[in-house]
Image: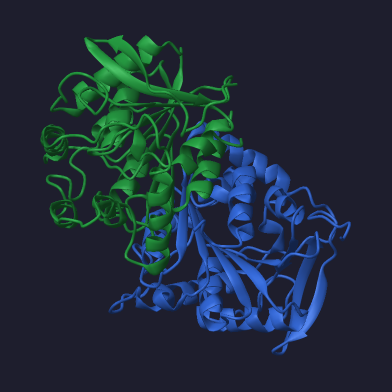
Chain colours: A blue, B green
Amino acid sequence: MTQHSHQTAPTQFVEAAGVRFAYRRFGKTGAVPLVFNMHFTGTMDHWDPAVTDGFAKGREVILFDNTGISSSSGEVPTSIEEMAADAAAFVKALGPAEVDVLGFSLGGLVAQTLAIAEPKLVRRLVLVGTGPRSGEGMATLTPEAQEIFGATYENPDHLWLRVHFSPSQQSQAAGRDFLKRFRLRSQGRDPEVSEKVAQAQIEALVKWGAPRNNPYEYLKKLAQPTLVVNGGSDVIIYTVNSFILQQNIPNAQLILYPDANHGSLYQYPELFVRHVSMFLEDDQGRDA
Amino acid sequence: MTQHSHQTAPTQFVEAAGVRFAYRRFGKTGAVPLVFNMHFTGTMDHWDPAVTDGFAKGREVILFDNTGISSSSGEVPTSIEEMAADAAAFVKALGPAEVDVLGFSLGGLVAQTLAIAEPKLVRRLVLVGTGPRSGEGMATLTPEAQEIFGATYENPDHLWLRVHFSPSQQSQAAGRDFLKRFRLRSQGRDPEVSEKVAQAQIEALVKWGAPRNNPYEYLKKLAQPTLVVNGGSDVIIYTVNSFILQQNIPNAQLILYPDANHGSLYQYPELFVRHVSMFLEDDQGRDA
């Protein structure tokens, strides 16, 4: 048991594959740790403490910056495969024999690729607000994403009110609560990423989303029990992509939340932690 | 608190709308009762005791035969609207000011119609293995359903192995466990329904499924928090219909289970009871 939380866990470093990876690790030891993979242009500080500390009550939480992001060294690779290989190198350098992996949006592309490449290292997989190769509306950023990421905001954090939350009053109120929570950590925050990071990540996203034949066939290789989660109204990676993931991954459960956009895990943090914990703790993966 | 269970609850009767409705009522009193609406050709004895007794630990469970089914009097109506009106009359005659309603398959069509017609009577709604008006593949029975219901079985119960469970070894094993459970009640069982019941229900199903303009518009009137549940591989009412329900009901959560056909609630009874209980007990309907 470590006493640290989302707010106090120090940023530590580990070397692997020529990269000095920044990470934070906290929560109850004993269970299989849960490794978090972040979205487009996000750092360790973009996770919601209501989510990370929620999980930390029951398991170790590992946040990290992948190659070239914020406090980690190196250049951001321009393919999801390289990002997944770097994530694998990081986890192996850190030491746990087995991890559960959660990926959000871009991080969900990395997480599924990592799970396929490393079936022994990754025990279970949680994919949030993400999609398959060549998914619907994934050949480029969606029109909504282009507009939302292209706009300027008096308060830059307000970008996330539009990325992660629906226009409804209730969702926007949940978004403002999220913004307060994700600014709570006052010391040792991650630096924001540069425009260069965004460009490399977009190049990787576009390669991933490009049309191809039988695009979902690779998902048959995903052997781990998988939980797919999204908001019912995701305009960043369309919700139908979560349905496609569930339909094509051999052992996948799907949960969609009402009146929620891309950041459903930040809109319903308690419910999300309960649903995911049930999934991670279910020894059978099924009742029967 | 009643001491009765799925196996021992006596069949009781109440008169309403000229029908003598058969019902059973058991479980912990105090919370809002949960009223179960059965599938095509099913009776009160087609519910899984692992599901009904699972819920009964936390709330009252009310099973009933709608008009013309098994132990209830009258003729089965040939429209979902009439079935829903009969269900409303039954609940009102029984007395609770407010109920939660669970509907499975045909029962899910009745349940959503009842919820729209009776917004004060129905607090929350659970729709399992069901679909919207004019849903995908709902203009007739699906080809798979026609084959499965049209075949003959040495043991008639084995029909349900194909209706409710996927062809996988694990799902079929879960199905055999279900068949044992649903035969456990030895006394006071409901009589099986006649061919006439099936014909009237099919007439109602075909009217419901007929193509129409803006077929999902009516779902906007569904004001209750709703949980939609299905197997990821439902061949009786195609799984995509559960996604369509979630996308069109204003406040709906969706859960799809892996490697599961029409009877996902019988394949994962413990998980289903936990998920639905979380939904029914969530006072906010959301975290925020």
x then y, percent, for residue A188 = 83, 61
**From this viewpoint, is residue A31 visible?**
yes
Q: Position of residue A145 (x, y in %)?
A: 44, 56
Relative image position of residue B240 (x, y in whole percent): 29, 52
Looking at the image, residue B147 sits to the left or right of residue A65; the answer is: left
At 67% from the left edge and 45% from the top edge, which residue is drawn?
A179
Q: Quadrant of the C terminus of chain B?
A: top right
Give the image quarter of residue A67.
bottom right
Q: Residue furthest right?
A: A3
Total numbered labels: 0
**Rendered residue at 37%/38% (across/down):** B127
Q: Residue at x 36, y 67 (%)?
A: B168
* Residue at the image position 12 percent from the left and 37 percent from the top: B195
Q: Residue furthest bottom?
A: A18
Dividing the picture into quadrants, the one containing residue A98 is bottom right
* Left or right relative to B104: residue A36: right
Position of B138 compared to A160: left or right? left
Q: Quadrant for residue A126, please give it.
A: bottom right
Q: Nearer the viewer, residue B205 or B116?
A: B205
Question: On screen, A222 above or below A282?
Answer: below
